[in-house]
Every structure is written in C-alpha cells, then in structure tokens.
Amino acid sequence: MSFKWNEKFSVGIKSIDNQHKKIINYINKLSALKKKKYHEESVLEILTELRKYIKSHFAHEEKLFHVNGYPETFEHSNAHKKFSEYINNFYEEVISKKAVDIEKMESYLVSWFMEHILVEDKKYEEFFKEHNVI
C-alpha cells in the first residue's frame, strides 16, 4: 500500500505540511518492506528515524502552540505523547521479540495520521491563520 499526500491534509502552514509529507514517506518506507524479504534491523532503522523525526515534528508544533497561545495545547500535546508511547512500545516489541508485524504498524500509522491530521491538526488551522502563522 502506498499512502499519498492529499491536499485535504494541509493545515495551511508550509513547515508543518512538509513535515507531515515526510511522515508519510516513513509510513511508505515501512510498507515497502512488506514487498521483499527484510530483517528486523531494517524495521528498527526506519522506526528509529521515525521516532526522531516525530519528536522533532511534535516539538515544532508545540512551540508554535506555546508562542501563539493556542488554547488546546494541553490536549494536543497529550495526543502527541500517546502516539510517541505507541511508537516506542512497538519499537521495544520488535527488539524484544524479534517479530515484526508491519501490517499492524502500517495500519496504525495510517489511521492515526488521518485521524490526527484531519481532526486534531485541523482544529488549529483557523487559529494559526488568525495569528498569521504560515
């Protein structure tokens, strides 16, 4: 499955849209592993990159929240924390069991991405427009 960027995912902030596109690329990297024989190390490498990138992306979003006084910062940050915990748990599961369920991971990532972007991130789109964040 190839997950593609769609303009409906745009939150109107170029830096965040570009970061979201990169997250889609990580999802697609994991998905591509299903099509060939792979080693757990390949999955761990992609998850390591994704974990670092997610941390950076969330920090960027949350900095914008704080600087601009976004009223739903706490709730949104909690959603980020839960997602990070899930990714970390999956990473640890791969390490400890050396078993990889890429289908499960891919399904979760796509579902979370669509739900988070189309619902949670869209909540701040208008707020940031009003505060001239582009």
Image (tube, helix red, strand yellow):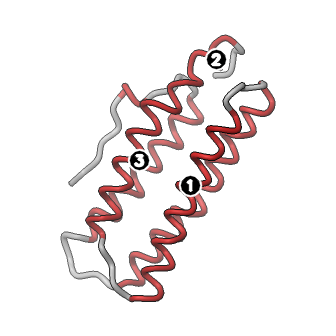
Q: Earlier in the sequence, mark 2 or mark 3?
A: 3
**Secondary-structure class at tag 2:** helix
Q: Nearer the viewer, mark 1 or mark 3?
A: 1
Question: Helix, strand or loop at disc 1?
Answer: helix
Asked whether the residues under the numbered discs 2 and 1 touch, taking CB atoms below 8 Å apart as contact, a structural biologist would say no
Residue at the bottom extreme, as displayed:
97
Q: What x and y, as percent, mark residue 55? A: 63, 56
Residue 63 against residue 39 in the figure, above or below = above
Residue type beneath disc 3: Trp
Check the image and report above or below for 123 versus 22. above
Residue carrying label 1: 82
Report whether 19 appears left or right of 111: right
* Few, some or many residues within 10 Å of mark 3 (<14, 14–19, 20+): few
Q: Quadrant of residue 98?
A: bottom left
Residue at 26% over, 65% down: 103
Amino acid tagged 1: Lys
Vertical side of 41 occupied by 3: above or below: above
Callout 1 environment at 10 Å: few (<14), some (14 to 19), or many (20+)? few
Q: Position of residue 37 (x, y in %)?
A: 22, 81
Give the number of the disc on residue 127: 2
Image position of 87 (left or right of 65): left
Question: Sequence order check: which comes first, mark 2 or mark 1?
Answer: 1
Rendered residue at 57%/59% (across/down): 84
Instruction: Tell me the tag on residue 112.
Output: 3
- Answer few, some or many: residues within 10 Å of disc 2's Cα (few below 14, many 20 plus, some between 14 and 19): some
Residue 21 pos. (x, y %): 44, 43
Picture quarter with the N terminus? bottom left
- Tell me the quarter of the image containing the C terminus: top right
- Pointer 1 or 3: first along the chain: 1
Q: In the current view of this chain or complex, which residue is farthest to the top?
A: 130
